[in-house]
Amino acid sequence: MASFFKKRNAPDPFKVSRTGKLIRLLVVFAVGGLVAFVADLFGPSSGDKSTGGRVVEYPNLNPSEHVIYEEEDIQQYKRVIVSARTIMPQNGSATVVIYGDPIGGKAQEINQLEAAANSWSQWEQKRSLNKHLTLKIINGPQPGATNVDVFLYLYPQ
């Protein structure tokens, strides 16, 4: 019985408890911070503002008569958006072929944009390294378009 009441070398229960709580608290903060970081990284964006931009309009183009080429100097712009739609005929379509002229290189096709009737189609390049952008507007696979609107949005950032 005497060994039951003998003092043992046990750690102080208050110190162990405080250390354990502190470690758990730090782990919870670290996990919460990681979740907040990932949510901010992949969550919805509040949007970007940009000033100093320019809009270039090419209204009422008729690619049924001949292929149309439009060229624009975009060297001072970093973000480029091309929007297009076919207005006439109701079932018509057009194709906008986008060519870029990179600094120190020759023009090459970047992308194609199909412009359908009564809806806008859009292509965007966020970090353009091109000096010039050439738009080639041709009739699409459906009945030829006789009225196409193309807009070029240029932003410095």
Image (cartoon, helix red, strand yellow):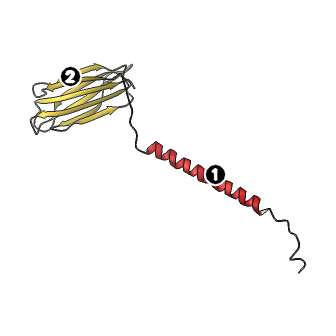
x and y percentages locating residue 107 in the rendered image: 31, 23
Residue 65: which quarter of the image?
Answer: top left
Residue closest to the far bottom: 1
| Residue positioned 76% across, 61% down in the render | 14
Query: In the rendered structure, which amino acid carries the disc numbered 2?
Result: Tyr
Query: In the rendered structure, which amino acid carries the disc numbered 1?
Result: Leu
x and y percentages locating residue 10 in the rendered image: 82, 65
Q: Residues within 10 Å of mark 1 (few under 14, many from 20)?
A: few
- Judged left or right of residue 96, residue 66 is left
Residue 120: which quarter of the image?
Answer: top left
x and y percentages locating residue 125 in the rendered image: 34, 31
x and y percentages locating residue 48 in the rendered image: 39, 33
Looking at the image, residue 78 lies above or below residue 116: above
Q: Pick the quarter of the image with the N terminus.
A: bottom right
SS for tag 2? strand
**Sequence order check, earlier mark of 2 and 1:** 1
Residue 42: which quarter of the image?
Answer: top left
| Residue positioned 72% across, 60% down in the render | 17
Which of the labelled discs sits on residue 69, or is there none?
2
| Residue positioned 11% across, 39% down in the render | 91
Q: In the image shown, does 131 or 14 lie closer to the viewer?
A: 14
Which of the labelled discs sits on residue 112, or is there none?
none
Q: In the image shown, does 110 or 24 lie closer to the viewer?
A: 24
- Judged left or right of residue 25, residue 44 is left
Residue matched to label 1: 26
Cβ–Cβ under 8 Å for marks 2 and 1? no
SS for tag 1? helix
